[in-house]
Amino acid sequence: MNAFNYYFPTMLKSGIGLAAQAGALLKPHLRRRLLVVTDAGLAGCGLLDGFFASLRAEDIGYEVFSGVEPNPSTAVLDQAVAFLKAHECDTVIGVGGGSSIDTAKGVAAMATNPGSILDYEGYDRLKHAPLPVFAIPTTSGTGSECTASTVFTNQETLFKTVIISPALFPRLAILDASLTLGLPPSITAATGMDALTHAIESYVSKQANPVSQALAIGAVRMIGENLRRAFYVGSDVAAREHMLLASFLAGVAFSQSKLGNVHAISHTFGGVFNIAHGIANAALLPYVLAFNAPACPERLRDVAIALGVDTRAMSVDEAARAVVGQVAELNQALGIPATIRELGVDLAYLPQMVSDSMRSGNVLVNPRLTTAADIERIITNAYHGVL
Ligand SMILES: [Fe+2]
């Protein structure tokens, strides 16, 4: 067995109704004034009433920045940092989907570091410790509540920049599935497929270790058993709880292992075409699995079994290949297009997409060695529906 490291400092509190007890859970960790980072829809819909009431019940001083947008840009981050400084907040909590939690991490980092967040692209490049950051996810997908990374779109190049620092792991993540009961099926599908992509890419990553793999394959199984149910019967509390936990497990797994070609390519879609991250991943996943299958058949057979495929009469290669069909079928059941053409990807941008994908650190840990020509073929196959 290869030597490996495992570092995961986030405290987890999981349970139905915990968001309405957040004040008491957070209080021991807080300093003077808390900044709540969220989006306007969540701030105004009443879903967070219990959360805000719990802060007031504990006499916690707080301010709310509700300007978060999907695929967050550096412009919104700059506004949020200015807001934090104007209100003299010294701790940050992201409440919402991945964009809110990523923005909260960005604010925590840029409150104490000079320049632009884009200056800190890559691993562990922050000069000063960020402010303490906390997270309450309201979707089951990104895993941002338990990772050391945050992603921002550079508005000039439209390239998505990933910043990773062990200091950006949230101190505390509160998982309360009651916040996810009202998610519409389209968001349940997109975020659930993002979590499945995290779990599978992490499981087959070259940087996977025994701990991350145990978490990743557990997440694959849990998503296979619960995503359809959460999509069709959104009020099913058990399905929602399992999806929220699976998303967390997959996030912890990929915080150790990184991801793979799906995320390397999908980040270029999010930046250039503003396609929802989970949908871009879901549509690409079968094509990347088909590309990877010859390189990691045993691991993909494990994935097939975790997804409920009866592999007993199959060879290892057949079982690996069965994952491709299984994921394509799941996409179809969830109403996700079978090609990236239907998502609005334009091949006129192919050279930029290929070069941006190759800049991603995720290509380096993809189980099959990947060249620019390979990325180009995966994108064109995903465009034309060639599996
Ligand atoms: Fe993702």
Image (cartoon, helix red, strand yellow):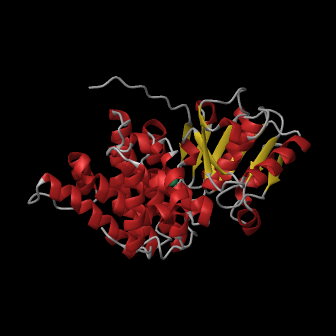
In the image, 212 versus 285, the foreground residue is 285
In the image, 57 versus 320, the foreground residue is 320
* Place of residue 351 in the rendered image (x, y in percent of width and height, measured from the top left): 52, 58
Quarter of the picture containing the C terminus is bottom left
In the image, 240 versus 38, the foreground residue is 38
Horizontally, is 100 left or right of 197 in the view? right
Q: Residue at x 35, y 38 (%)?
A: 206
The answer to whether one can see residue 177 in this image is no
Quarter of the picture containing the N terminus is top left
Horizontally, is 366 left or right of 29 in the view? left
Vertically, is 23 above or below 139? above
Q: Residue at x 48, y 51 (%)?
A: 264
In the image, 333 versus 269, the foreground residue is 269
* Place of residue 234 in the rendered image (x, y in percent of width and height, measured from the top left): 49, 71
Outermost residue, right direction?
Answer: 86
Q: Residue at x 11, y 59 (%)?
A: 314
The answer to whether one can see residue 344 in this image is yes
Outermost residue, left direction?
Answer: 313
* Place of residue 89 in the rendered image (x, y in percent of width and height, measured from the top left): 83, 39
Based on the displayed image, in which of its 4 quarters is residue 81 positioned?
top right
Horizontally, is 255 left or right of 65 in the view? left
* Place of residue 200 in the rendered image (x, y in percent of width and height, measured from the top left): 36, 51
